[in-house]
Image (tube, rainbow, N blue to C red):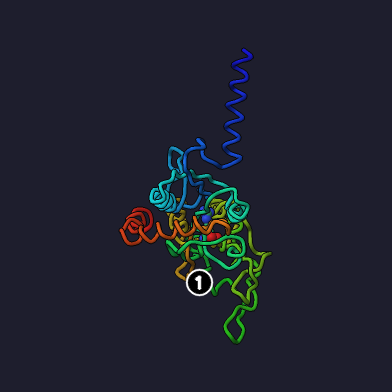
Amino acid sequence: MKKIFSTILAGITVFFFCFMTASCSNSNEKCLVMATDADFPPFEYLDENRNIVGFDVEVAEAVSEKLGMTLKIESIAFDDIIDEIENGKYDFGMAGLTVNEERKAQVMFSDTYATGIQSIVVKDGSEYTELDDFFDGFDESGNPIAAKTNITIGVQKGTTGDTYASAEPVDWGFGEENVNKYDTGEKAIQSLAEGKVTAVIIDSEPAKSFVDKYAGLKILETPYANESYAICVNKKNTELLGKINNALDELKTDGKLEEIYNKYIAR
Ligand code: ARG
């Protein structure tokens, strides 16, 4: 009995240890651990068997294969990805991650492997039909003076959509006080479907996936911002970054990147 108990205890310890260190199960195995937030279809999401799948996952698998390493993936809060890469907890972050100056202060980015657009999602029949509708008056250079008083914008916390939306109206933001921040993009979308927010700012591909999933929503034609996606690594890891860039280059020339793109994005 005591033996069974200690075996179970050892099992539990190993289980938690794996989660705490985000490392390979076997120390001889050469593996790369990727941090993502698997709630962002078609880039990373859970399939019916709760496996993490998607465009980013297949690109990461192809990169790891070129590097001769085994890929492990962990899904964490989106808001923690950049910090955890900076802390060295994971080898790289890949999550439909937009390259921006603020993040470059903490991590290094690979070459771009895809582009994205920040879209505005509203309810069908919404009185808001273009970006200008969310603002009240424009100055002589055409920048908004104020956001409409009765709007609430939903975003996923810590995303670039959050940063843009939370900015002041002169910078085409809606003001921090008008932004509701959710743990996942899908929660923001659910909130819109329930009529709790006026609009959601989210990347265009997840926007399309969620509009297909939740009835009564649509994407406005006015794009909110254009962006580039890349893989991020710890600033000390120049060697890994070089290898990732070489692998991405090969995937671009041998057509594999396009094949994965066609499977998940150009559907
Ligand atoms: N592109 C946006 C950003 O980098 C949103 C990415 C969200 N990704 C995710 N897996 N939830 O901030």
Mark 1 secondary-structure assignment: loop
What residue do we see at 54% from left, 41% from top? 23
Residue 137 percent coordinates (x, y): 61, 80
Along the viewing direction, whichever of 203 and 216 lies nearer the viewer = 203
**Which percent across, then down, holds residue 184?**
56, 51
**What residue is rendered at 55% in x and 73% in y?**
133
Q: Nearer the viewer, residue 54 or 28?
A: 28
Q: Is residue 200 visible?
A: no
User: Quarter holding the N terminus?
Assistant: top right
Give the side of residue 221 with respect to residue 251, left or right: right
Amino acid marked by disc 1: Glu
Which residue, as the protein is rendered here, is positioned at the far right? 177
Quadrant of the rendering where the C terminus is positioned: bottom left
In which quarter of the view is residue 262 placed?
bottom left
Give the residue drawn at x 59%, y 21%. Answer: 7
Residue 156 lies in what quarter of the image? bottom right
For label 1, the residue is: 130
